[in-house]
């Protein structure tokens, strides 16, 4: 795999109302490979959304560099190409919907990229089919549910043909069913289209299917590893204000009552099988 996102000693500060500087990212060195699924976790204020905005040049480093497919985000001439390569999906889909008809909304980005009408039609149809929203192509976005709106927002990003999509807390405003649909769609995009996925989330369960997890704390990488490596570090996660998936929590509580279960069971099925094996 080749690198698609790389940060080199990335630092960033926000200016407070009193004129002081609040350091949000502190010398981050991160590399994300083509085709990888990376989840980024952290409590509010840890810097994860600020980091996400650096991945398609919405924010520029105060120190260090961000390279996207080898392109430096600080080079103004490369910004359009960088944003073609890395698409963004945010937590509030209403902020990304710009038209009064679903298919017109999805067509907005390829139109602005100068695509030919036939190519736009293909991209819109392909994107809507990929997210399961083709039958709603002539609907008004404001009449859709939150989960449907988010799928349309994802389709709008897909229509740009990005190699990587950064999801910045895409399920934060959705009900449990909407969350399940969107998370399932994220996995589908990775598996069927080979899109590199970066998922920013505070829902631990959403990170279970990732290849790798980065845990941010105070603008630095506090932990890095596979989901099993990260989620078995219950005490370390709690120390920085994070929890673990409910499956791991159940196994830990059962162990406190005398069971001898491995904490690495992340899915419901793995958890059930581990408990059954112990009881037998």
Image (spheres, rainbow, N blue to C red):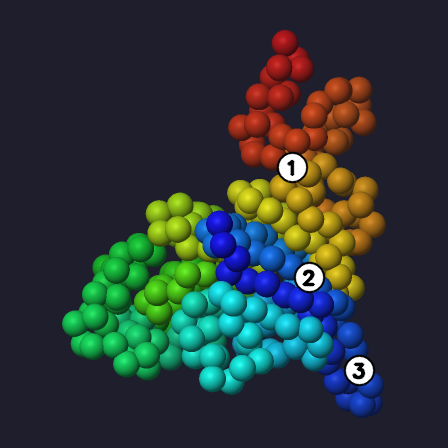
Which of the two discs, 1 and 2, sits closer to the camera? 2
- Residue 34 as seen in the image, left or right of residue 254: left
Against 161, residue 72 (above or below) is below
Q: Earlier in the sequence, mark 3 or mark 2?
A: 3
Q: Which residue, given by chain and number where applicable, does mark 2 sit on?
A: 29
How far is mark 3 from mark 1, CA to CA? Answer: 37 Å
User: Measured from the top left, where is residue 73 in percent x and y?
Assistant: 55, 76
Quadrant into which the C terminus falls: top right
Against 117, residue 170 (above or below) is above
Q: Which residue, given by chain and number where applicable, does mark 3 sit on?
A: 21
Residue drawn at the location 26% of the way across and 71% of the way down: 103
Q: Residues within 10 Å of mark 3 (few under 14, many from 20)?
A: few
Residue drawn at the location 47% of the way across and 79% of the way down: 78
The residue lying toward the viewer, choosing from 201 and 38, is 38
Residue drawn at the location 21% of the way across and 70% of the way down: 119
- Residue 82 as seen in the image, left or right of residue 280: left
Q: Residues within 10 Å of mark 1 (few under 14, many from 20)?
A: some
The residue lying toward the viewer, choosing from 133 and 211, is 211
User: Measured from the top left, where is residue 174 in percent x and y?
Assistant: 51, 59
């Amino acid at each position: 795999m080749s690198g698609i996102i790389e940060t080199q000693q990335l630092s960033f500060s926000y200016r407070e109302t009193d004129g002081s500087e609040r350091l949000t990212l502190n010398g981050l060195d991160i590399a994300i490979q083509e085709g990888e699924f990376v989840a980024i976790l952290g409590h509010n204020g840890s810097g994860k959304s600020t980091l996400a905005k650096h991945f398609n040049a919405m924010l520029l480093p105060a120190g260090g560099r961000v390279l996207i497919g080898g392109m430096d985000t600080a080079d103004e001439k490369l910004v359009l190409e960088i944003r073609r390569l890395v698409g963004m999906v945010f937590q509030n889909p209403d902020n990304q919907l710009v038209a009064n008809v679903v298919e017109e909304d999805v067509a907005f980005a390829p139109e602005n990229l100068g695509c030919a009408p036939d190519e736009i039609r293909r991209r819109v149809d392909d994107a809507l089919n990929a997210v399961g929203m083709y039958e709603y192509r002539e609907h008004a976005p404001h009449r859709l549910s939150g989960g449907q709106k988010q799928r349309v927002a994802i389709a709008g990003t897909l229509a740009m043909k990005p190699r990587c999509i950064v999801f910045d807390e895409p399920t934060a405003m959705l009900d449990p069913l909407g969350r399940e649909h969107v998370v399932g769609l994220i996995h589908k995009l990775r598996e069927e289209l080979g899109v590199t996925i970066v998922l920013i989330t505070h829902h631990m369960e959403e990170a279970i299917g990732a290849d790798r997890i980065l845990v941010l704390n105070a603008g630095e990488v506090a932990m890095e590893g596979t989901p099993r490596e990260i989620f078995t570090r219950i005490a370390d996660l709690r120390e920085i204000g994070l929890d673990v998936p409910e499956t791991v929590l159940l196994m830990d509580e059962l162990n406190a009552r005398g069971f001898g279960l491995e904490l690495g069971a992340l899915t419901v099925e793995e958890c059930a099988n581990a408990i059954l094996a112990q009881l037998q």
